[in-house]
Amino acid sequence: MRDRFELRETDAGGRIGELRVPRAGVTVETPALLPVINPNIDTIAPRRLAEEFGAEALITNAYIIHDTPDLREQALSEGLHGMLDFPGAIMTDSGSFQLAEYGEISVTTEEILSFQAGIGSDIATPVDLPTPPDAPRERAAADLETTQERLTVAEGVDVGDTLVSAPVQGSTHLDLREDAARHADGTDLDVFPIGAVVPLLNDYRYAETVDVVAAAKRGLGADAPVHLFGAGHPMMFALAAAAGCDLFDSAAYAIYARDDRYLTVRGTRHLADIDYLPCSCPVCLEHTPDELRALPDKPREKALAAHNLHVSFAEIRRIREAIREGNLLELVEARARSHPAMLSGYRALLEHADQYERSDPVSKGTFFYVSAESAARPEVLRHHRRLERLSVPDSLLLAEGDVSGGEYDEVWTLRPPFGPVPPALVQSYPLNTDPPERPDRAIRVAALRGVARLAEANPDSELAVAHEGWPPGILAALPDRVETIDTK
Ligand SMILES: [Zn+2]
């Protein structure tokens, strides 16, 4: 059991947790956003990240520091916290990204881990081998073997109180991701980054990103803090959090600002195209788009970076609140409407509803049916499964509205998208929901799937459905022996 990470609340695969970082003496609340600081580039000072944005942790690159003589000397003499002037937790990356980009780096796992601990990193990273998406299976498997050997080496390096991350690789081969995660979970390392997803995210392949995360989650214990390495766009934070990611890092806030790109939770805009600023952060309150465009390069970049960060941190807070309220999936649904690729990502998440149903609390606020996708949510799946265990009388009427039972032993409610609901459960979560007055096909099909499940589990009971004008094409989904009565 990892005692450094404690879960406070869950919703779907999302969690509010506390990651204790002993070397820094701080506790980081998750989901958390770690802004990326390039020690060579001055965009937003780390002190300001902590004080103005509430950043509890940041991430910087130990390899750049290691290979830049001035920085290296300063980091070794003042320590990373002194050099960057940051009071929170500092995570360091090892140079695996440079390895992926340029093919070669000049340090070993022992050297770079000892160096990270030596400069006072709170969470250090071994040199893993990031295998890009779509790599041939043989290559992904061979890379993974190397990464796993390095994790074993990493376990043996004395880093004091510094936590060490165990990256999970495996490219887009889901079985490899799951194996890699299970292996990483078996080490005594502390934080679990899912690596090499940036090319997927850059190409808007959100559905495959979700599949990769879900595979990794199957191999990791619930007590494993999961970092989606390189995920920096606020549009997809809610989706990734619902898939079970606890830590994000954003270089996007600075990189996008450099080319005048303005982040929103619904996508990216170019400053040149904006007439109205859809944001109430200090930057957007103090400037019009024309004023921002008129700023000299460096102040404009800093202003946009500050806006980009404000939007990103606000989304993290919104996600935490949604998890606390139990409506994270409603937030994901809203985000899914901003881009077809996000919708695919949400649908991919729902394809794993069975997996995420296990961490979903049995009771939370109110279930809102807001799209056809809602019919595939874990709560619906769970109710359908429960139907098999309910005791059913010899004859049962499932009625959408108020109808008299007549000759039936009992009348249960037919409540889309859940289907049959016995009287004792009508007021309980999630069945106590009001379906939309103008239903779509999916909500009725899901309800009938529930009826079919009940019929299958009770072959000797006589079942009938009383509906208010449902089209025959939808009712055809019912088993033949279920009678249908149109009450409209
Ligand atoms: Zn703003």
Image: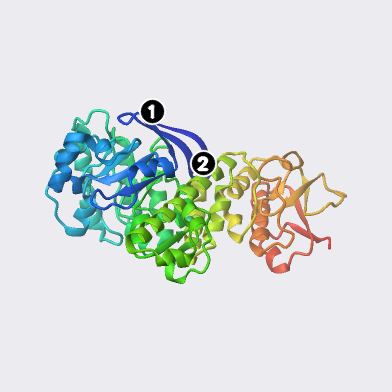
Q: Contact, CB < 8 Å: mark 2 with mark 1?
A: no
Residue identifier under label 2: 358
- Which residue occupies the foreground of this view, 82 or 171? 82
Residue identifier under label 1: 3
The x and y percentages for residue 258 are 33, 62
In this rendering, is residue 278 above or below 216? below
> Residue 85: which quarter of the image?
top left
The residue at the far bottom in this view is 273
Q: Is residue 32 left or right of residue 376?
A: left
In this rendering, is residue 30 above or below 243? above
The x and y percentages for residue 375 are 61, 56
Q: Is residue 109 left or right of residue 357?
A: left
- Residue occupying image coordinates x 30% and y 54%: 196
Q: Amino acid at mark 1?
A: Asp
Color scheme of the displayed model:
rainbow
Q: Amino acid at mark 2?
A: Arg
The x and y percentages for residue 81 are 27, 36
- Foreground mark, 2 or 1, reads 1
